[in-house]
Image: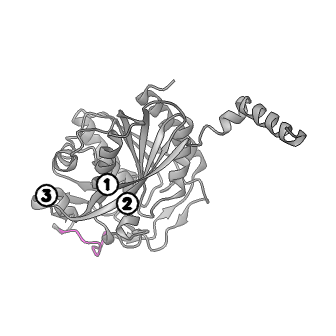
Amino acid sequence: MTRLALAAAMLLLATSMTPGVRAQTADIAVRTELHAIPSQTLSDGAFLTGKDGKPVTVTGQLRVAQGSGRLPVVVLMHGSGGMSPGIDSWSRMFNAMGVSTFALDGFTGRGLTSVSADQTKLGRLNFIMDLYGALALLAKHPRVDPQRIALMGFSRGGQAALFASEQRFHKLWNKSGAEFAAYIPLYPDCSTTYIDDTDVVAKPIRIFHGAADDYNPVASCKRFVERLKAAGRDVVLTEYPDAHHGYDTPLGSGPVVAKGSQTVRNCSLVEKADGVLVNAATNEPFSYRDACVQLDPHVGRNAAAAAAAQIAVGDFARTLFKLK
């Protein structure tokens, strides 16, 4: 062995034995896999009434955390802007805990990159179809503990993560025989009241929102949480002061105007018979042309809220998954 090769080998050995270096690499997945997931693209009305839509294939990235055997997994569902840098940030946090992640892309397979400026491009409930498909795949994966699969979503994905807990939707569309261990929505839209929407599965729901959010205001989530609690459900809403929409993004600062983005912050929607979503103010079927739909909400990082959310979600995950 040359002197240079010997020095390199000694450095590699020393690095592998240094606790600080190991800690710095704990968030690196030991294996990354890309998976195709059969799903459907359908209208919200079709989803609510159990009518099939157009077959589509979406994809997900599984990052297998360091560890052996079957590991817990958190499914991550993006928002209206697609796969954001926040997905990677949360993935690394969970991976460092010994928790694998599955980042689900509900857009690319549908030929989309963003629906922020035109929410009509995809019905809001489609992501729930994708999430149930991801659950079916992960429950059979040899490196996944099927009893420890949690769901976390952001904005539009947070709305899906919240309402994926509905018993009625499970009966209609979840054919896997598996269940998510918990539901963790971040700044979801809670403006829609569905039929029997307090009949959720017997799993914990933990919502993390921003008090300053003018994209998906927290007020409607507070009202929904009150109804869930009155029905005896395991739900907690954590609210961060001065935090706007997307407060957990690791890039940029905030708040800034999301120019052209549509928000239903002034809308109240109610499901009627035959899966029709009605604007409560007009008693007519809801449309994104309705006066309650507005533009240009604010988004951006709030460092204090981001740090607090990571701590709170991390602590919840450790308890949920019984991690050391």
The quadrant of the rendering that contains the N terminus is top right
**Residue 185 image position (x, y, % from top left):** 39, 47
User: How many angstroms separate mark 1 from mark 3 (CA)?
Assistant: 17 Å
Residue labelled with disc 3: 49
User: How many angstroms separate mark 1 from mark 2 (CA)?
Assistant: 7 Å
- Of residue 99 and residue 80, the one placed in the foreground of this image is 99
Residue labelled with disc 2: 106
- Residue 289 in the magenta stretch? The answer is yes
**Residue 10 image position (x, y, % from top left):** 81, 33
- Of residue 62 and residue 269, the one placed in the foreground of this image is 62
Residue labelled with disc 1: 130
Are there few (<14), some (14-19), or many (20+) residues within 10 Å of tag 3? some
Q: Amino acid at mark 3?
A: Thr
Range covered by the magenta-colored residues: 285-292
**Residue 100 image position (x, y, % from top left):** 47, 40
User: How many angstroms separate mark 2 from mark 3 (CA)?
Assistant: 21 Å
- In the rendered view, tell whether residue 315 sits above or below residue 53: above
Q: How many marks?
A: 3
Farthest right residue in view: 3
Q: Amino acid at mark 2?
A: Gly
